[in-house]
């Protein structure tokens, strides 16, 4: 089939006159969005009426690649035994993230009633309490927005942050009197809907009182917990699509069969029937969010740092290592003590192990290890603090932080949004383990015994890690 491969068009699919209008705008176009929110919308009972207009997060060339394919791409659903191929058709517009004129145009359309985002934990430029960070790029964006007059000058306007671009869209919508909109963050920030509400409200006040008042009256913030493992696409995946489908696709996406989306909040102007695809709508997001952050994401970080420490490359390799597996199970035992009943945690844990063991996914530990400070802050630190305050140790928490410190000490490159702060600590002589841990969460340093345990373990070679850490506090 590959000899006759060619770009697929909407005409080939019989869709030349069936293009839904964009009713959802998305910031952060990448593999996860196309495997998750776009998939849920495509599989909603009324999905044919909900087109998506997406903006990239970075200038990666993805928008141009997808534009050449008319927004079409292949979703490869990869189980432990086979690959299934699905052509996704609901991405109807794609733009580079910095296209301010397009942002203003799209978000000001009355038919666009939902804004979703997939941004890394650090990408919002907000603290976990929603307070805007002291960030020069964010300050520059706010200054540019304060002097913006109507839509004039949008072709020359440059905004560098996601909050700045969202506020541009909301200001354009306000001026167009286009009606209410729901903002739906789809990321691993705890209490993401409320964090984004606080942050954007404060930032809107810094732009203008008119914008702040409009946001308060017309923007709803929906909290979510999202889950679908989506590794980076490789050249082999691109070749596989061509071989198996006959379609030349420059931007396929690989994902697992499992998909979960839990949402809590209001949609004042409507939404797709995502529940048809398995989405859950709940009144309180926190239990589901913590289950996912601590059990799935926490385990991923443990496997990443302990696995890289031991020379492993993928999640499947790391979870097959008895020492890494033991750390995961130990951390889960700590985490479940901090979770409420009714979440079917035993079944969830068993399902996670099955997902991790899917070697065909090729989910690389290096991908998980990026932006380590914020990830460890949200995935590991809360469990450690809760356990120590309850009078218990958290051995796996000690192990993963020690493996992280060793990695920082032995590598010159560690992509991280807080890389400047890390470098300041690492350039000191001698390097302070306590100062590194403080960057994750000051509460960890206040525990005292935790820092001592990590410091002792930092000097231990990874394949000589003790089976347990002596506990003076016992377990319940």
Image: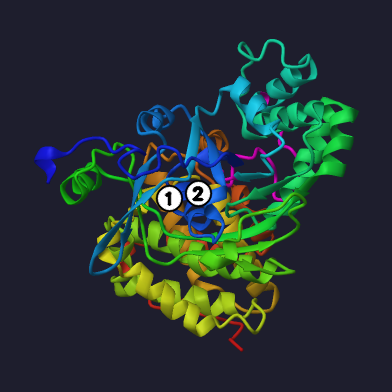
Q: Answer left or right for 205 relative to 164.
A: right
- Residue 214 is left or right of residue 370, and the answer is right
Residue range highlighted in magenta: 117-136
Who is closer to the viewer here, 154 or 313?
A: 154
Marks counted in the figure total 2
Where residue 394 sits, quadrant-wise, is: bottom right
- Does residue 451 appear in the picture of this structure? no
**Type of secondary structure dominating the magenta stretch:** loop
Q: Is 118 left or right of 391, judged from the image as shown?
A: left
Q: Residue at x 23, y 65 (%)?
A: 82
Estimate the x, y position of residue 72 in percent, counting from the top left.
Answer: 38, 40
Query: Is the residue marked by circle 2 packed among few (<14), some (14-19), or many (20+) residues within 10 Å?
Result: many
Q: Is residue 126 magenta?
A: yes
Indicate which disc residue 369 carries.
1
The residue that disc 2 covers is: 372
Q: What's the CA distance linking mark 1 and mark 2?
A: 6 Å
Q: How is the image coloured?
A: rainbow
Task: Check the image and report above or below for 76 versus 213.
Answer: below
Contact between labelled residues 2 and 1, with CB atoms less than 8 Å apart = yes
Is 412 drawn above or below residue 287 in the view shown?
above
* Label annotation for residue 203: none
């Amino acid at each position: 089939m590959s000899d006759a491969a060619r770009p697929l068009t909407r005409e080939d699919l019989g869709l030349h006159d069936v293009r839904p209008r964009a009713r959802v705008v998305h910031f952060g176009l990448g593999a996860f969005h196309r495997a998750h929110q776009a998939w849920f919308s495509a599989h909603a009972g009324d999905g044919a009426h909900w087109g998506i207009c997406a903006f990239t997060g970075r200038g990666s060339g993805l928008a141009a690649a997808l534009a050449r394919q008319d927004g079409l791409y292949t979703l490869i659903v990869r189980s432990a035994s086979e690959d299934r191929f699905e052509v996704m058709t609901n991405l109807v517009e794609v733009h580079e993230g910095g296209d301010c004129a397009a942002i203003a145009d799209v978000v000001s359309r009355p038919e666009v009633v939902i804004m979703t985002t997939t941004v890394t934990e650090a990408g919002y430029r907000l603290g976990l309490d929603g307070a805007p960070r002291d960030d020069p790029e964010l300050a520059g964006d706010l200054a540019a927005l304060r002097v913006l007059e109507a839509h004039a000058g949008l072709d020359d306007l440059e905004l560098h942050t996601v909050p700045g671009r969202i506020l541009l869209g909301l200001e354009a919508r306000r001026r167009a009197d286009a009606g209410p909109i729901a903002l739906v963050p789809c990321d691993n920030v705890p209490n993401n809907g409320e964090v984004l509400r606080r942050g954007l409200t404060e930032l809107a006040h810094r732009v203008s009182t008119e914008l702040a008042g409009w946001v308060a009256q017309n923007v709803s913030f929906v909290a979510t917990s999202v889950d679908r493992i989506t590794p980076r696409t490789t050249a082999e995946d691109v070749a596989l699509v061509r071989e198996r489908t006959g379609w030349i696709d420059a931007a396929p996406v690989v994902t697992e069969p499992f998909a979960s989306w839990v949402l809590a909040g209001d949609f004042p102007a409507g939404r797709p029937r995502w529940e048809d695809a398995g989405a859950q709508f709940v009144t309180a997001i926190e239990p589901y969010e913590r289950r996912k952050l601590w059990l799935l994401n926490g385990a991923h970080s443990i496997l990443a740092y302990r696995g890289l420490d031991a020379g492993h490359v993928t999640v499947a390799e790391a979870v097959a290592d008895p020492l890494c597996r033991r750390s995961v199970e130990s951390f889960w035992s700590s985490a479940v003590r901090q979770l409420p009943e009714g979440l079917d945690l035993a079944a969830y844990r068993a399902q996670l192990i099955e997902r991790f063991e899917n070697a065909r996914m090729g989910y690389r530990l290096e991908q998980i290890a990026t932006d380590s400070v914020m990830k460890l802050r949200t995935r590991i630190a809360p469990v450690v603090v809760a356990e120590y305050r309850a009078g218990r140790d958290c051995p796996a928490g000690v192990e993963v932080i020690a493996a992280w410190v060793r990695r920082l000490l032995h590598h010159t490159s560690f992509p991280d949004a807080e890389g400047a702060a890390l470098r300041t600590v690492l350039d000191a002589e001698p390097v302070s383990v306590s100062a590194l841990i403080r960057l994750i969460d000051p509460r960890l340093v206040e525990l005292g015994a935790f820092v001592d345990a990590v410091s002792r373990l930092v000097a231990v070679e990874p394949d000589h890690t003790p089976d347990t850490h002596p506990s003076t506090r016992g377990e319940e």
